[in-house]
Image (cartoon, grey):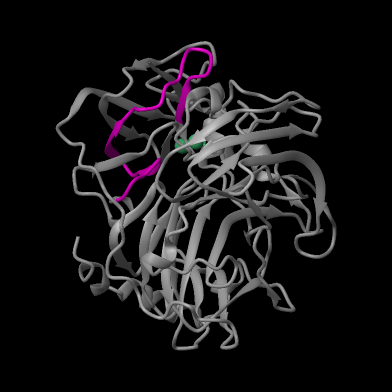
Amino acid sequence: MKRRQFLSSSATALAAAAALSHGAARAFAQEQTPKQRLSMPPLLDTRSTGRLSLQAQSGSQTFLGGVATPTVGFNQDYLGPTVILKNGDLAADVKNGLKAPVSAHWHGLLVPGEHDGGPHLPIAPGESWQPEMHIAQDPATIWYHSHIHERTAEQVYFGLAGVIHITDGEDDARGLPSAYGVDDLTLVLQDRRFDNAGRMVYDPSMMDVMHGFAGNRLLVNGQAGATAVVPQGIVRLRLLNGSNARVYTLFFDDTRPMHLVATDGGFLPEPIALNTLTLAPGERAEVLVDMSDGKAPVLLSDPAQPYGVLPFAVDAALPARITRLPDKLDGVLEDLAGTEVETRDISLDMGMGGMMRGGGFAINGRPYDMGRIDFAVAQGTVERWRIRSTMIAHPFHVHGVRFRVLSENGAPPRPENTGWKDTVLVPGEAEIIARFDQPAGQETPYMFHCHILEHEDAGMMGQFTVT
Ligand code: C2O
Ligand code: CU
Ligand code: CU
C-alpha cells in the first residue's frame, strides 16, 4: 500500500469539520464542564514478577456528576488496570469478588483454549482461577474482558474490561513514543446510555438487541468530557473500541492524518497515513499523531454526522521525546494465501426467525450451544474462512489466532485491515486466513462470534476445537 493514496481524499473530513461550526455536533460527548484532564487506567506491570493478579469487584462511579452508578471492575470500581506483559511465563490469578460468575478472556492473546478465559472457564463467586500461561507473540495492544455466556454484554458494559500491552521493550529502537500517559496514550472508547439523573443504564429493548445497544454519551477510559493533554511532538494513541455495539469512524477536526502503526495483532511493516480510521467493537489500532504545531485538535467520529470523541490540548512543558515519524516498522506480515487446507463458509445470521423468536441470532442457522462443537480444526494448519453478514455489518472475532484479511466484498481490504487482525468488521462478505497453532480441546474450545455483545449473547457465536 502506498501511503499517499490515503492522504488524497480529505473531502469528507473537511465537510465534517465545516459542519462542526453549527455547534450541535459537539453535543454528544462534550457537554461536561469544567474541562478535566483525561487520565489513564493505572498500570499493572507484570514484567519483573511474572505474576498477574486481578480481582473482579463491585464499585460505584459518578460519571457525569449527579447520581452514582453501581459498577464493576478489575482491581477498581470501573474497568481494570492496563496490564503490561512480556513474552515468557505468566502466572495469573483472577479472583471473583462478585455474586455472579465472571471470566477473564484474554482477547488477542495467543494461548491454548484452557487459558483463554472463554465461556467454559467461569469463575464462581468467591473462587479464583489460576492459569499458568506462556506468552510468546509479537508486541501488540490487546485486551481482557468477562465472557460469560448471555452475560458478556452487561458485564462488559458495567466495567469488566481492561487493556493489555504486550511489549518487548524495543519501542525506542522503533522510534515510537512509549511514555505511558505522556506521549503513549491508552484510549478505551465506550458509548454508554445515561438517564436524566446521570445514572448509567443498561436496559436493552428488542430493538436495542437487533441493532446492538447504543449510548447517548461517549466515555474515554470511563471519563466523560475530559481533555487529553499531550507534549508538542509525536503522540501514540492506542485505541480500543470497548463499546458493546457502536462502530467509530475517527478523524481529526482539522483533518490532520493518523499514521496507523499497529492493528489488533501487532505492528505493520510501515506506517499508513489515514484521514479516517474505522474501529468496530473489539478492534484495536495504534496511530501516531503529529502534535508539533501546538494546536489543539479534536478527535471526532462519523464524518457524515460528526460528534466529539476526545479533545486534545498541547502542553509544551511535557517532554516531546519523539519528533519525527518512523519510516519503517518491524511488523512482519505472513502471506498465508494458497497454503490453506480447508475453506469454511460462516454466515452471521439474524432476523431469520423474526423478532418474535428472539431475533434469529445464529451462525450458519444454529444459535450458540455450549454443548455443541461446531467444527474441528487440525492444529498447525491454515484455513480460509468466508464470512457473510446478514442485515447489518457485524464485527467478526476469532479466539486463539491472529488472521489476515484477504478481501472485503471481493476487493482488497481497506488499510485498517491490512495487518494482523483478530476482529474484523464484515460489511457484506470478507475472507480471512489463519494458521491455527494453539490447541483447544472439547472442554475449552475457542469461540468465534460477532463482537456486538448483544448479538453474541443472543446466539451469534460458535465454537471449535484445534487438535
Ligand atoms: Cu473480545 Cu470472544 O471476545
Ligand atoms: Cu476474544
Ligand atoms: Cu452482530
Work out which quarter of the rendered image holds the C terminus and state it: top left
- In the figure, 200 relative to 7: above or below? above
Q: Does 399 appear above or below 283?
A: above
Residue 27 rendering spot, x and y as whole percentages: 61, 71
Residue 22 lies, in percent from the top left, at 52, 81
Left or right placement of residue 166 versus residue 341 in this view: right
Residue 412 position (above or below residue 62): above
Query: How many marks can you see?
Result: 0
Q: Magenta span has 314? A: no
Is residue 205 at all visible to an observer of this figure?
Answer: no
Residue at coordinates 64% horizontally, 40% vertically from top-left?
51
Magenta range is 419-448
Residue drawn at point x = 62 percent, y = 67 percent: 29
Instruction: Answer yes or no: is residue 53 visible.
Output: yes
Assign the N terminus to one quadrant of the image: bottom left
Q: Which is more toward the observer, 439 or 281?
A: 439
Q: State which quadrant residue 187 falls in.
A: bottom right
Quarter location, residue 228: bottom right
Magenta region includes residue 433: yes
Relative to 30, 263 lies left or right? left
